[in-house]
Image: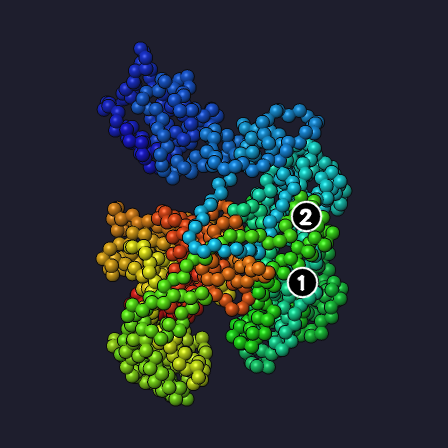
Amino acid sequence: MATGFGRGGRGAALLQALNQPIRKPGEQDEPAPSGDAPAPPPAVPTTVAGPGSIPVGRGSMGRGAFLQGLLQGATTPALSRGQSTGNATSIPQKMRPLPASGGRGVANLQALIKNAGRGGGITVPSPAPQMPQVKPPPQPPVSTSQESTPTPSVTSQSGVAPSKGSSDPPSSRLSKMALDRPPVVHKSGTAGKLMSLSGNYIRIKCENAGVYQYHVSFSPSIDSKNMRFKLVNNVRDVIGFTKAFDGFILYLPHRLSDQETVLQSKRPTDGVDITITIRLTKVILPEQCVPLYNIIFRRVMNILEMVQVGRYYYNPKTPSVVPQHRLEVWPGYITSVCENEDGLMLLVDASHRVLRTETVLQLMKTCVQKNPNGFQDECTRSLVGTIVLTRYNNKTYRIDDILWSKTPLHTFKTSQGSELSFVDYYRNAYHKEITDQEQPLLLHRPKKKQLPGGKVPEKSEAICLIPEFCYLTGLTDELRQDFRVMKDLASHTRVTPEQRVATMRKFINAVNSNPDAKKELTNWGLSFAENTINIDGRQAQQEKIIFGNNYTCMAGPQADWSRDATRNKVLTPVDLKNWTVIFVKRDAGKATEFINMMQNCCRQMGIQCNKPTCCELRDDRVDTLSGSLRDNINPLVQCMVVICPTSRDDKYSAIKKICCVEMPVPSQVIIAKTIAKPDKLRSVTQKIALQINCKLGGELWGLDIPMSNLMVVGIDVYHDKAHNKRSIAGFVASTNKMCSRWYSKTVLQMPGQELIDGLKLCLTSSIRKYHEINHVFPEKIVVFRDGVGDGDLKYIDHEIQQLQQCFGNFGGEYTPKLSVVIVQKRINARIFLKGDRNFDNPPPGTIVDHTITRRDKYDFFIVSQHVRQGTVSPTHYICVHDSIGMKPDHLQRLSYKMTHLYYNWPGTVRVPAPCQYAHKLAYLVGQNIHKEPSAELSDRLFFL
């Protein structure tokens, strides 16, 4: 009989009925002989072979009967293979339970019963898990103290006594939990030149065998979290002063004498006796205590009198002042405990927080002077969504709104029920006098914290802030575009590798020289090494860059071929025969010089450039420009070039909406001042010519990609959370062997959504385009997915399933191999090249695939770009799905090759080119177009 069936046993029942002999109405099922005497079959099988079996027969037509069978089987021991109960032999062969082989209903019911067993109600026996062949971690020693009540003898290393109402002793279950860890994933390459490296990691040593986790309950129950903290602190003479408590779970570095400790305490508010029950639940190994150790190091930062601003801690006592720009820089540290392939480590990095010395009130007064009539809209646009710092308590707040109708003279109700004005509150609480009593208030809405049980409170209190006491943090877009500001800040924030290592040593000395900080770590049995770790790395060989006329050159030690890119013919030129240049009257001279230089530069690159059609605008209005574009775009025009007098977002968006959606044609926007200087005109025009060639479908250079029938995909998502606009996913796929031509699509999603729902359509369209060009389907597909943080890695299977499902659209025989690689560039890991006496930046092509990689992930780091200032940042690659089975050397080499193919820069970039293309596409659509671009431009890099 076929045993594969669908939901809830319906298919199995149908197959069973078809195999039975035909009977007349009223007759019973024909029993099968069992021994000498026939036995009538039961209506429902009386024995269930285990939780993975499904009773089949009359009365078992779905989930209900299956659930009943599972519940019956949950109370009996699991049968091993070939074993049966006493009456199992009486069941006819046709009605023996079938093995569960599929169906969502089956799986959900099994999970339901399994979870019920975990909760102490129904215990479902299950076969022992197959443990990976790894060396078991050391277990905490068993406490030898005599307890007040005898407990059953349990063979366990965890020292946890069994609890009532449980089928398995907790000690054996917890020892399995301690050992039930994924095996260490070690996939390292061998190709390349060996290098001696270091990183910003320090090894952590743990003297204790583990951390003891206790569950704390109160009788009568206590709802207030602060009250629970006070009550637990009252019994510190029993549990000790070293602890970590979150309101329910208590962590201790030592084991209490009893399995269950019952203590008495008085509630300070009314003197009621409270019974505190502290019960040992499990022993956690040091390697599994990463969240707890991070909390301990945050305590250490507070002991060192560091101030938390955002995620990290900074020292407000030693700021670096930049008075000419009204800025100051706070130095600080980034600390993070992590379990890597080579054990527990502490990541330490230097961080800087830029603060503005002007207050929100000063900014508001500036807005009033600039725009007296519309200053409220200007202030709202500038302030809402920004982070401010209140120096009286060194806390940061996000401005969610401006209350123009309220002033510091308004009152609020205190916890005692009395009315108090903001002026009096700040005078009494912080000894601060409010000078401007007519200023509006700023509103901050704290994030709603989940209550026990996952509930979210309906109402939450808002915080009103005084603009006079709020200092702006971070940099505005206007400041970021100011070259002088960024140059002056770089002298404080760009830290060399040698300075970064000195900062790490300074942090180690600060902790070791502070008795309280040292004691905090010692109480938990923690200490760390005095120097950074040593790493053996490799450098990939230089790539050969291919240009037109079969000219080749090496990428060079700095991975920069800008000189060769502008002096040689491009790989695939597209002649510029019919193009239009639009400009205003005052830029007519600049436009003429640009056109002449464009014709000269294109000739050297092997591109034929005819004289364009010139269109002079009568004014600088957006409507005039839009009308001119619509009048000049026709089917024969290859490209529209617009020279704008100034940089304006509204004008740029209008140009891109017309040229990318309404009347699709490649477009190039040039700011007049970039072509105003004659000494720089040639270099600027060369870059514009290369960019226009890409937008017309040309190819600038290429690499040798040894894999045949390969498609490389890049995916990234753009979010505009500040304006609550829709998120845009960019999808880019290669369509030729050299990965120099690309097909693109976009997916519009809900605001803030990172995981993509429309990947199936994107990949299906890309495969069809690949087949249209190459007349063969891709056999191997490598996806580089950018923008996925550690918290979203567990959800990436949702996207992998979409990618796999689309293969069925091309017939059942088409099953290409698929690899999915997560690309993370916003990381705090740093890699240093060790010299004889100092540390330096590693060269492009540096690969690290062990020691500091994840313990249970197939991952590696690549330094692909060259920097002239500061410290280079590596890129983290995590392979989350791999059916191609490439060797680590081949996947690393392919990832490094992809960083050479971004046509906006004649050198390597930090991420693979398809990821950078997907980012540019998503940014253009999300920031300017807000619609899906026309399909006529999908086979060109129109978004560069």
Circle 2 SS class: helix
Residue drawn at 28 percent across, 28 percent down: 1
Circle 1 SS class: loop
Q: 873 or 71, which is in the foreground?
A: 873
Where residue 932 sits, quadrant-wise, is bottom left
x then y, percent, for residue 44: 37, 24
Residue drawn at 26 percent across, 25 percent down: 20
- The numbered disc on residue 521 is 2
Q: 103 or 802, which is in the foreground?
A: 802
Q: Can the viewer see residue 626? A: no
x then y, percent, for residue 916: 41, 63
Q: Can the viewer see residue 205? A: yes
In the orientation shown, which residue stands out farthest toward the top? 36
Q: Residues within 10 Å of mark 1 (few under 14, many from 20)?
A: many
Q: Are marks 1 and 2 in contact (CB under 8 Å)?
A: no
x then y, percent, for residue 707: 32, 54
Residue drawn at 67 percent across, 74 percent down: 438
Task: Tell me the amino acid under the disc marked 1.
Answer: Asn
Where residue 912 sits, quadrant-wise, is bottom left
Q: Residues within 10 Å of mark 2 (few under 14, many from 20)?
A: many
Residue 7 is left or right of residue 126, and the answer is left
- Label 1 belongs to which residue? 315
In the orientation shown, which residue stands out farthest toward the front? 836
The answer to whether residue 296 is above or below residue 622 is above
Q: 718 or 164, which is in the foreground?
A: 718
x then y, percent, for residue 918: 39, 63
Task: Tell me the amino acid under the disc marked 2.
Answer: Leu
Residue drawn at 34 percent across, 85 percent down: 596
The answer to whether residue 161 is above or below residue 317 is above
